[in-house]
Image (spheres, rainbow, N blue to C red):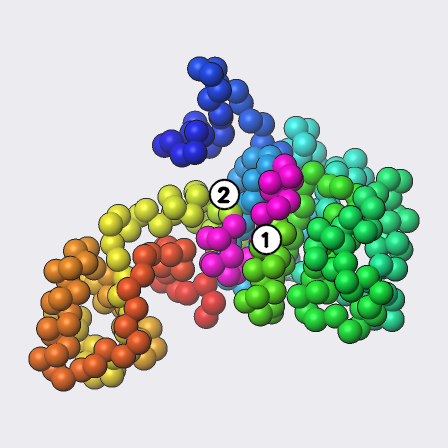
Amino acid sequence: MVSDGFHYIKRTRVREVAGYTWGVAPILRVWELRKSYGPVRAVDGVSFSVEAGTIFALLGPNGAGKTTTVEILEGLRVPDSGEIELFGEKVTKVGPAQKARMGVLLQEGSFEPYLRVREVLELFRTFFPKSREPEELLDLVGLKEKRKALVRTLSGGQKQRLALAVALLNDPELLFLDEPTAGLDPQARRHIWDILRDLRAQGKTVFLTTHYMEEAEALADWVCIMDHGRIIAEGTPAELVSRFGPATFVEFELPPPAFPELSDRFPQKVRQDGEKAVLQIEDLAQDLSALLSWASSRGLSLRNLLVRQPNLEDVFLALTGRRLRD
Ligand code: ATP
């Protein structure tokens, strides 16, 4: 497989420069990681590799085991078994030497509400022997104008950007973000995405967990789809959706009584999603015209008709029979 001058051999990315092949060492490798809470196998034999300078996404529904995985990698939990290689070194438990080189944004972080934005950064920088300048970080996360604002007056997106600035104080090579945009509105989410792309452009590695397939699609160079503690598929977003070949999806509202007839007309290709029908078609012109003729002959209006390419939600559904966000 070749893309952007890179190709993959046994999942190790190598770059070809002037006829020579240079290995790009992964910054993080995990083999057969396991962690149970009593009878619950939260992480059940997970292996993956993260290339330096990329955005890696662990995508999965609630309870898939993403937070447990990321907390092991952040050194907050001890795995039951498995191997971790971080910054080129094998470790049984992530310790201070590795933590000094990483930044962490926890799923449920909060700051003292009566501190000012700049004061939060000044406070947290005292934890590190060397740190980046708060003003520089406020600029990077777009909070310069809010430097004197009280934390309690910030919006959800602004608080999350402040948390990101705190995670960057020690100038980490590897940044862990657990559900960085959960609960944010689309504009705030896009703002965070832009910052993460900037960080990648600066050579940082970003490891994020998310249950938003749009987030993984928009940002990630490599996606591992996780479900019930296991990785069920991995690849670039484009590779993962390529399983559908040249298929296109057509969605529209359909009265439930019309579903069986639509299924007869397009066998194996129709899915009912609440009030919506989702039809997988191969030949856009021919199949769409057959659909419109069928609807017109039945007097159906096919409201909110949408034609789209397959996405990671379709991949998850095809693999598990469930949606990412049920
Ligand atoms: P979410 O997005 O909801 O945080 P997740 O994919 O991050 O989900 P985890 O939080 O790792 O998943 O949870 C994986 C499984 O382990 C779930 O079944 C959860 O209920 C269980 N679990 C997580 N933490 C604990 C704990 N401290 N004690 C017992 N069970 C736990």
Q: Residues within 10 Å of mark 1 (few under 14, many from 20)?
A: few
69 drawn magenta: no
The kind of secondary structure element at disc 1 is: helix
| Residue that appears at 44% across and 15% down | 19
The kind of secondary structure element at disc 2 is: loop
Residue 162, above or below 71: below
- Regarding residue 32, the answer to whether it shows in the image is no
Residue behind mark 2 = 221
Q: Amino acid at mark 2?
A: Asp
Q: Residues within 10 Å of mark 2 (few under 14, many from 20)?
A: some
Q: Quadrant of the N terminus?
A: top left
Find the magenta span and give its range.
197-219
Please indicate whether residue 60 sits to the left or right of residue 273 in the image. right
Residue 100, position as x, y percentages in the image: 79, 39
| Residue that appears at 19% across and 58% down | 284
214 drawn magenta: yes
| Residue that appears at 38% across and 31% down | 2
Residue 289, position as x, y percentages in the image: 13, 66
Residue 86, position as x, y percentages in the image: 67, 34
For this orientation, the residue located farthest to the top is 19
Front residue of 323/187: it is 187
Residue behind mark 1 = 194
